[in-house]
Image (cartoon, coloured by chain):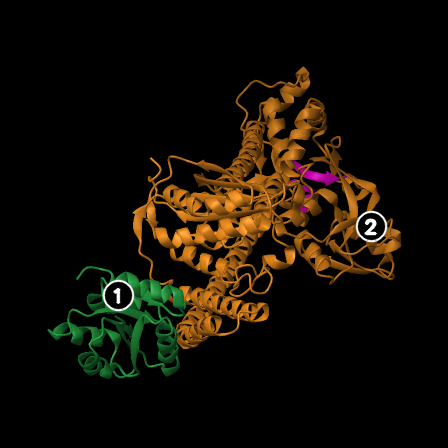
Chain colours: A orange, B green
């Protein structure tokens, strides 16, 4: 189980690693692509310019460009001062296509960019939306980036569809951005909260300080991901798109046409690559990130396996506890039984002595009377009854004495088959009288064991006689012995379970008859001392309990069950040493 | 001539029964004693052909009686039969040095059986 679990877990792990590797590979490819497009141009221009335009470029070797310094993911300066983002890629592409290098000017903020443009301290500002006010001092290229405006919130606002619906709400915007300009006319009815950057605006909405943030969808996605904001959702998409262009100083119309030609030569796949690199079309939700997804799946899978493993382990423990409890109960029962037998034994020795002398007196008295009394029928019957009573009482006492002396086995190495045969010989006459056919099946390979032949003979004779009594007139008695490996639960019925386990090899002796079998009600008590099913005076109820005691002293077990074909089957098992059977 | 039998047992009713049953055959003269310690003096005086000896007696066990008889030159030839209520290996084992080889009867015993045993012991060669 453990090994399987580990293997399965490893397979999971490899899969996750494989996906992760794929993900990183994709990133590396993107990074390489971006490097290629933003690398300084050293190749020949790939845009077909007319002679005038080419001449213009030659006469203007330095073109100063001022990007918005803080407009992620479109463009921004990172911590080490490099300009990056979608716009940076576009600028790189243009440099490449035109075979020129722009001089990038870093302004403090967007407002400064516009100021520099007005003073003609820079030649291009980017990215910039066309407004009538800006047209006063700038020419505009074609649009190369457009962005969707959205309203985001941390709650559902089904009634908000446009900016006009924001009456009464606390609205977060970035100061000076298009949205600020758009909303300002409504500032009497809309609570406008102006922030210096988008991050702060989004955090205020995320924490419920403001109700909504209005900005470009791509910027919101980018900043949310960077800041780990997960609870914002788009409640409305705005009709108005932001179209971003290059703004060119008014006296350089040639540059506008050059830029437009270059922008036109950018293929859709190049545009998609740029967009994917910074906005990530398919990774707008964190749970769709493959690293997250497969890590989560792997963790879930592992947890599931863990739960299954713990459940199985728990069941195994439970089963073991049940087994141990049962074993303890059995041991306790055996102890109680042993104690019972011991006290019966002690009692028996005392009783025997005190009972046998009176019995002897009665016997002798009856003997005398039988000689001296008139020999009429009634007297003879009385004397006979006394004789019988003495014999019965004596039998009981003898049985009791067997208890007190069972501790003393004369153990010797011997063969059970010989004991079986000699015991059968002793009951031969009885069997023949009752018309009982004895069928012997003794295995030759049974090993010698430590046994007390006399005691075992006593047991076997007892069992044979029980069978004979159960069959009345005619029947079959099967007696067999063999070495056997216990391979079925049913082999361990009754007492056998207390001493043997599945897989043990035992010396197996079985005595089967075609008699009346054991009644269900008698089964539980059949080995109890003094329990008998025979008529009063015909059985002491000690035979089986003495037999069981003797078998137990041989470290063996005995059990009785009914055969399917009718009749009873007694199985006796003895321990054999490993290798004894060869 | 009647055979002389000495019966030693701490159970008076039993010794009486044995005496009555044996003497009514006309073949035996029986003397009884109910104390183990009386066995040797009685034997010396009565000169029995055979002694029926109980094993478990309070003052002197059958084992001790047998040992005392063996030590006495005059009495050492007397045969005896042990009669006991306790037919256990353990008890036989404990005193086996002195009762080994002797006939041993378990109570209760039928008169016929007792007589047959007595006759068989007496017919043994000296």
Q: Quadrant of the N terminus of chain B?
A: bottom left
Position of residue A88 in the picture relative to residue B111 (left or right): right
Task: Bin the neighbour count of mark 2 within 10 Å (Cα to Cα): few under 14, some 14-19, many 20 and up.
Answer: few
What's drawn in magenta, residue-wise?
A115-130
Q: Is residue A502 visible?
A: no
Viewer-proximal residue among A521 and A36: A521
The dot on residue B93 is 1
Q: Nearer the viewer, mark 2 or mark 1?
A: 1
Residue A224 at x, y percent in the picture: 67, 49
Q: CA distance from mark 2 to mark 1?
A: 124 Å
In the current view of this chain or complex, which residue is farthest to the left?
B73
Query: In this rendering, is residue A342 above or below A60?
Result: below
Q: Position of residue A206 (x, y in %)?
A: 71, 57
Q: Determine whether the residue tagged by mark 1 lies in a helix, strand or loop.
A: helix
Numbered disc 2: what chain? A
Quadrant where the C terminus of chain B is found in the figure: bottom left
- Inspect the magenta stretch and tell me whether residue B116 lies in it: no
* Chain of the residue under the numbered disc 1 shown in the image: B
Residue B73 is at least partly visible in this image: yes
> Observer-nearest residue: A333 or A534?
A534
Q: Position of residue A154 (x, y in %)?
A: 75, 56
Residue drawn at 15 percent across, 71 percent down: B76
The residue that mark 2 highlights is A182
State the residue in front, A44 or A63.
A44
Instruction: Assess disc 1: are there few (<14), some (14-19) or many (≥20) residues with their C-alpha within 10 Å of its C-alpha.
Output: few
Q: Give the side of residue A563 with respect to residue A128, left or right.
A: left
């Amino acid at each position: 189980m453990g090994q399987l679990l580990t293997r399965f877990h490893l397979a999971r792990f490899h899969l996750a690693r494989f996906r992760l590797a794929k993900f990183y590979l994709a990133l590396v490819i993107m990074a390489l692509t971006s490097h290629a497009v933003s690398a300084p141009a050293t190749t020949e221009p790939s845009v077909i310019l007319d002679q005038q335009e080419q001449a213009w470029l030659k006469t203007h070797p330095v073109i100063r460009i001022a990007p918005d310094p803080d407009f992620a993911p479109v463009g921004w300066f990172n911590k080490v001062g490099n300009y990056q983002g979608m716009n940076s890629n576009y600028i790189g592409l243009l440099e490449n296509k035109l075979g020129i290098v722009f001089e990038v000017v870093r302004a403090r903020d967007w407002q400064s960019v516009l100021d520099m443009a007005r003073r003609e301290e820079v030649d291009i500002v980017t990215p910039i939306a066309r407004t009538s006010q800006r047209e006063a001092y700038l020419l505009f290229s074609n649009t190369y980036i457009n962005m969707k405006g959205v309203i985001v919130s941390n709650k559902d606002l089904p009634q908000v569809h446009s900016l006009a619906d924001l009456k009464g709400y606390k609205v977060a915007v970035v100061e000076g951005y298009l949205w600020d300009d758009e909303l300002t006319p409504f500032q009497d009815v809309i609570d406008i909260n102006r922030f210096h950057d988008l991050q702060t605006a989004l955090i205020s909405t995320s924490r419920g300080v403001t109700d909504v943030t209005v900005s470009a969808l791509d910027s919101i996605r980018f900043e949310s991901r960077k800041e780990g904001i997960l609870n914002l959702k788009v409640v409305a998409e705005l009709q108005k798109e932001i179209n971003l262009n290059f703004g060119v100083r008014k006296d350089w119309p040639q540059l506008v046409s050059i830029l437009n030609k270059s922008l036109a030569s950018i293929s859709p796949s190049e545009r998609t690559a740029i967009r994917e690199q910074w906005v990530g079309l398919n990774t707008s939700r964190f749970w769709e990130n493959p690293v997250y997804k497969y890590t989560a799946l792997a963790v879930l899978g592992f947890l599931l396996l863990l739960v299954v493993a713990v459940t199985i382990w728990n069941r195994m423990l439970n089963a073991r506890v049940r087994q141990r409890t049962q074993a303890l109960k059995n041991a306790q029962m055996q102890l109680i039984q042993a104690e019972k037998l011991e006290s019966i034994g002690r009692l028996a020795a005392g009783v025997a002595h005190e009972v046998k002398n009176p019995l002897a007196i009665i016997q002798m008295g009856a003997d005398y009377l039988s000689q001296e009394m008139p020999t009429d029928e009634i007297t003879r019957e009385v004397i006979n009854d006394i004789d019988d009573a003495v014999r019965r009482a004596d039998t009981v006492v003898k049985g009791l004495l067997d208890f007190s002396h069972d501790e003393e086995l004369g153990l010797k190495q011997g063969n059970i088959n010989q004991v079986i045969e000699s015991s059968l010989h002793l009951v031969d006459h009885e069997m023949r009288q009752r018309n009982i056919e004895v069928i012997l099946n003794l295995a030759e390979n049974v090993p010698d064991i430590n046994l007390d032949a006399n005691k075992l003979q006593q047991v076997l004779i007892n069992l044979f006689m029980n069978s004979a009594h159960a069959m009345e007139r005619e029947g079959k008695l099967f007696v067999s012995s063999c070495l056997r490996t216990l391979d079925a639960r049913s082999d361990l019925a009754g007492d056998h379970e207390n001493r043997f386990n599945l897989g043990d090899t035992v010396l197996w002796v079985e005595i089967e008859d075609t008699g009346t079998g054991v009644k269900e009600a008698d089964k539980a008590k059949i080995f109890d001392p003094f329990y008998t099913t025979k008529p009063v005076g015909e059985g002491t109820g000690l035979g089986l309990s003495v037999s069981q005691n003797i078998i137990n002293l041989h470290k063996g077990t005995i059990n009785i069950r009914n055969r399917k074909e009718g009749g009873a089957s007694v199985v006796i098992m003895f321990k054999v040493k490993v290798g004894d059977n060869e | 001539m009647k055979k002389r039998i000495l019966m030693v047992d701490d159970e008076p009713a039993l010794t009486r029964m044995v005496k009555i049953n044996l003497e009514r055959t006309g073949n035996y003269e029986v003397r009884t004693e109910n104390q183990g310690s009386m066995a040797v003096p009685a034997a010396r005086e009565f000169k029995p052909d055979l002694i029926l000896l109980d094993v478990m007696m309070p003052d002197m066990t059958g084992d001790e009686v047998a040992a005392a008889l063996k030590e006495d030159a005059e009495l050492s030839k007397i045969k005896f039969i042990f009669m006991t209520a306790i037919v256990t290996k353990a008890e036989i084992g404990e005193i086996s040095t002195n009762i080994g080889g002797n006939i041993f009867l378990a109570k209760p015993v039928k008169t016929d059986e007792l007589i047959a045993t007595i006759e068989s012991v007496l017919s043994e060669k000296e």
